[in-house]
Image: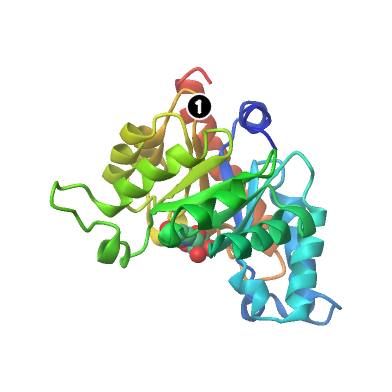
Amino acid sequence: MTRKELIEQIRKKQSFLCVGLDTDINKIPDFLKETEDPVFEFNKRIIDATKDYCVAYKPNLAFYECQGPAGWESLRKTLEYIPDDIFTIADAKRGDIGNTSTYYAKTFFEYLGCDSVTIAPYMGEDSVTPFLEFPGKWAIVLALTSNAGALDFQMISDEKGKRLFEKVLEKTTRWGTPDNTMFVVGATRAEGIGEVRKLVPDHFFLVPGVGAQGGSLEDVTRYGWNEDCGLLVNSSRGIIYASNGADFAEAAGEKAAEIQRIMEKELRSRNF
Ligand SMILES: O=c1ccn([C@@H]2O[C@H](COP(=O)(O)O)[C@@H](O)[C@H]2O)c(=O)[nH]1
């Protein structure tokens, strides 16, 4: 999906919500466990209930890979089921020597047909650029993450006071463009979102950390907004486990609709 198409979807749906498909087999309602593919059946119902309120889905690979070949099949079927006009993110946090990164890119972009994949940039240029060679596809590079451990490396400063996450932004913006690169910036660091926005005014941010991790949607919008919206805000557990009963899909739909209404207010107040 191109940037123009993504922005069109945000305008049309008045939403910049990404629903995280972190589908934990242990949290799936019992009645679905009797089906042939419980993870897919769960996701299918979540997608049916939430697709009108979101512009992106983000399956996190950990929840699928742990199931072996069956998990990969659940993931493949899920991605195939997601409507074509919704942006898909494989949250896989990949990146390796160039030759290997090319094959990761082929896996996510060609075999699974995802629009984007999350990238850990620690191995540098040749680990990231292979993901930028696929027209219409995106690399979503970890910049300032939402977890406590973000402080261990990302905030380390060099002798001039430049922090590691700033160096990541400076370098990666030279390798790609705002049409094929996004950055992960955690919602738990509202002031950090503002700092990143100043450094990269044009790029889209994937922002996890609202909902279960406590980040504020209003703060994310205040600090992260750019003239194209520039935000995809993810919530996983807060939506897909809004209820653990037979009404789980209905509850997920209600939660997604509630977030979309807040987003619509934010978008309209900026004449978007
Ligand atoms: O900085 C980061 C990067 C990725 N994540 C991932 O996003 C979701 C968040 O799930 P919630 O249930 O909404 O907390 C999950 O897949 C993480 O692995 C992140 O949280 N922070």
Residue at (31, 66) in percent of width and height? 148
The quarter in which the N terminus is drawn is top right
Horizontally, residue 206 falls left or right of residue 76, namely left
* Residue behind mark 1: 267
Q: Is residue 254 above or below residue 225?
A: below
Residue at (53, 49) in percent of width and height? 140
Q: Secondary structure at mark 1?
A: helix
User: Outermost residue, top direction?
Assistant: 271
Number of marks = 1
Q: Position of residue 251 (x, y in %)?
A: 64, 57
Question: How did the renderer colour the structure?
Answer: rainbow
Q: Is residue 266 above or below residue 47?
A: above
Horizontally, residue 58 falls left or right of residue 149, namely right
Residue at (59, 65) in percent of width and height? 241
Horizontally, residue 13 falls left or right of residue 158, namely right
> Does residue 65 appear in the picture of this structure?
yes
Q: Quadrant of residue 133?
A: top right
Q: Position of residue 72 (x, y in %)?
A: 75, 72
Q: Is residue 202 above or below residue 239?
A: above
> Does residue 21 appear in the picture of this structure?
no
Horizontally, residue 48 falls left or right of residue 156, namely right
Q: Residues within 10 Å of mark 1 (few under 14, many from 20)?
A: some
Residue closer to the observer: 172 or 246: 172
Look at the numbered disc 1 and say if its residue's Cβ is closer than 8 Å to ligand 1.
no
Q: Position of residue 141 (x, y in %)?
A: 48, 51
Q: Position of residue 68 (x, y in %)?
A: 72, 81
Residue closer to the observer: 63 or 128: 128
Going by the numbered disc 1, the residue's amino acid type is Leu
